[in-house]
Amino acid sequence: MAPWLTGRTLLAVERVDAPPGPKTANLERAVGQRIEAVTRRGKFLLLPLRRPSVAPSGAVGGGDVPGDELVVHLGMTGVLSPRPPASHLRLRLRLDGPEPDVLYVQDARRFGRVLVVPSGDYRTLPTLAAMGPEPLSPGFTVAGFAAALVRSGQPVKAYLLSQRPVSGVGNIYADEALWRARVHPQTPARALSRPRVRALHAAIREVLAAAVELQGTTLYDYRTVNGEVGAYLEKLDAYGHDGDPCPRCGAPIVRIVVGQRGTHLCPRCQRRAAPRRGAPGPGRSAARGQR
Ligand SMILES: [Zn+2]
């Protein structure tokens, strides 16, 4: 997206089937602003905008004034494309410059968001505001991850999905990383032993790096901006494989629900750790984790 969009000015926002609301808040404010870059934080696309300044005298000088930020989250079924989609078109963003000069936003299930905030002001986006380190950056360390995990009594999978201990881990990659690290998804985050924390830290990095390499996982709708499917689907070990043999031990993968999300695991490889003798009981741990 970056080579296509960087430096272009948004000429118009056309709401094809996207009524005003929080998911498209302040979108019209982007009109007349120039896209300075295409960046990313976790699963949020961040496009800093710059508003051309108009000097009162008409004289050139002072440069551009800082503008807003266009924030995009694809949700479950969002697709950004330079080509008009066959169905579920929600928005057309018209751009200056050569063709392709329209950014089409398709979203079958409408979980996606395309909105404008003042630059760096994420008060209306609490997940982004509280987001943990980037998983593939040097800032994601075993020590930092361990320190984050002990702050929560939530099931480790639910805590990963919150994006707080580390960013970018969604439902599919959480299942894959937990399978790889042999961690039961319902283990309270703070109950993970240091070897399991280390294994999970490594597994998250391995799974995400490999998935990015293959342009992600296309279950249904996801396409890259070039219209290609993500090929990581073929590499999934646990997610979506309920009933299939575990690639490691051969036991059938099962599907359970954790935090209202479908969750896949090997009941033989990913056992729930028995409470350690002398450790605080699960009740008290869970209560502390809520704060
Ligand atoms: Zn197994």
Image (cartoon, helix red, strand yellow):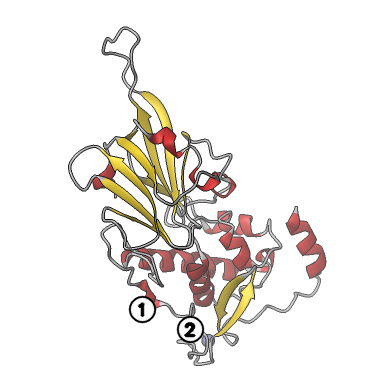
Which amino acid, by three-letter code, is at mark 2?
His
- Under circle 1, the secondary element is helix
Mark 2 burial class by Cα count in 10 Å: few <14, some 14-19, many 20+ = some
Q: Which residue is mark 2?
A: 241
Q: Which residue is mark 1?
A: 234
From the viewer's perspective, is residue 83 above or below residue 243? above
Picture coordinates of residue 90 (x, y %)? 41, 53
Q: Is residue 38 left or right of residue 244?
A: left
Q: Are marks 1 and 2 in contact (CB under 8 Å)?
A: no
Separation of disc 1 and disc 2 at Cα? 11 Å
Which amino acid, by three-letter code, is at mark 1?
Glu
Q: Tell me which residue sits at (49%, 77%) in the image.
A: 239
Q: Tell me which residue sits at (68%, 68%) in the image.
A: 188
Q: Quadrant of residue 39?
A: top left
The earlier-in-sequence mark between 1 and 2 is 1
Can residue 255 be seen in this snapshot? yes
From the viewer's perspective, is residue 24 above or below residue 160? above
Picture coordinates of residue 223 (x, y %)? 33, 63
Mark 1 burial class by Cα count in 10 Å: few <14, some 14-19, many 20+ = few
Q: Is residue 166 left or right of residue 114?
A: right
